[in-house]
Amino acid sequence: MKKLIFTLAMTSMAFLSNAQWLADGTALTSTFAMKDINNVSYDMFTMLNSGKHVVIDLSATWCGPCWSYHQSHVLDNYFDKYGPSGTSVKDAQVFLYEVDQATTMADLQGTGGSTQGDWVTGTTHPICNEASTGTVLMKFLAPGTTSYGVPAVFVVCKDKKLYQVSTGLTSEPGLRNYIASKCGVAPLANEEVMDIDFSYNIYPNPSSSATTIHLNLDKSNTISYSVSNSLGQVVFKASPAEFASGTKDLEINTAGLSEGLYFVNLQVGNRMVKTKLIVAH
């Protein structure tokens, strides 16, 4: 269930469906900034253009269903695995965004008069509690909306399209697989390979029309990659390029390749790794 907020009368509460939010697949046409409670600023398009997808939980401290979702810790677990300092591909950013601009820091800490508990302790992803929330909210609300239900969780893919995430998804694997279906990121089942100063995975594999090397660099380095067939013949080769640290997606077009076994040859600096790739049309 979701609590209803009237944008002109914040004291009113009821229950509502999700019709007030933008439809799945709607693309953001302009960026917006958010500042967290530690005074760190984030720009949406900067994050997306760096190859990340962004998960944002629109909630209110006084909202019971919001608190229940928060207590599942699914977004903490997702952030801890896929966030900027995560243990996996580091292709995500996650936010808790407080929608009620009357919420105080005491409310967030669980000591105020309008809260379900302590939202800060144990939360690993950024929390935003801004004096003016309209700019962010209007990016997700359908035109003409005067009320909306919370919690409302969205993922914004790197192509700037947004999709609402069910708050019934309270496991990190379930959330990852849902986001993979919308954003094209590597799903949980696709294992990341850790190497010296970098990690990578290749998805989809098997591939029909294209596959992507999802690369995470611990430091800047020269990258080159190629594809060879089972006879060792090179059928695709990319020119070496210098990349800064962070996540990179390197796409390989497989539409013109015959079905069968291939090898992706990835060189990071002086380190060469080889991975099997199946092409199946």
Image (cartoon, grey):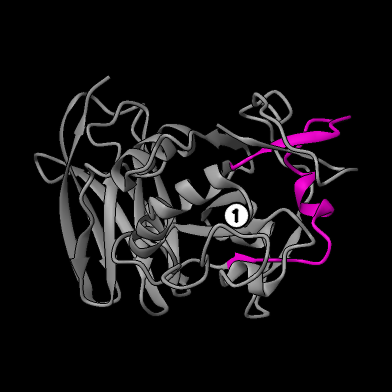
Q: Is residue 217 magenta?
A: no
Highlighted magenta segment, given as a residue range: 127-151
Q: Is residue 148 magenta?
A: yes
Residue 239 shows up from this direction = no
Which of the 4 image quarters holds residue 220?
bottom left
Which of the 4 image quarters holds residue 143?
top right
Mark 1 is on which residue type? Leu
Percent position of residue 213, x then y? 34, 51
Left or right relative to 151: residue 243: left
Residue positioned 56% across, 61% down in the render:
50
Q: Nearer the viewer, residue 100 or 136?
A: 100
Quick one: which residue is furthest to the left in this view? Answer: 231
Left or right relative to 160: residue 87: left
Percent position of residue 207, x then y? 28, 31
Percent position of residue 101, x then y? 79, 60
Task: Name the residue beneath numbered marker 1.
Answer: 48
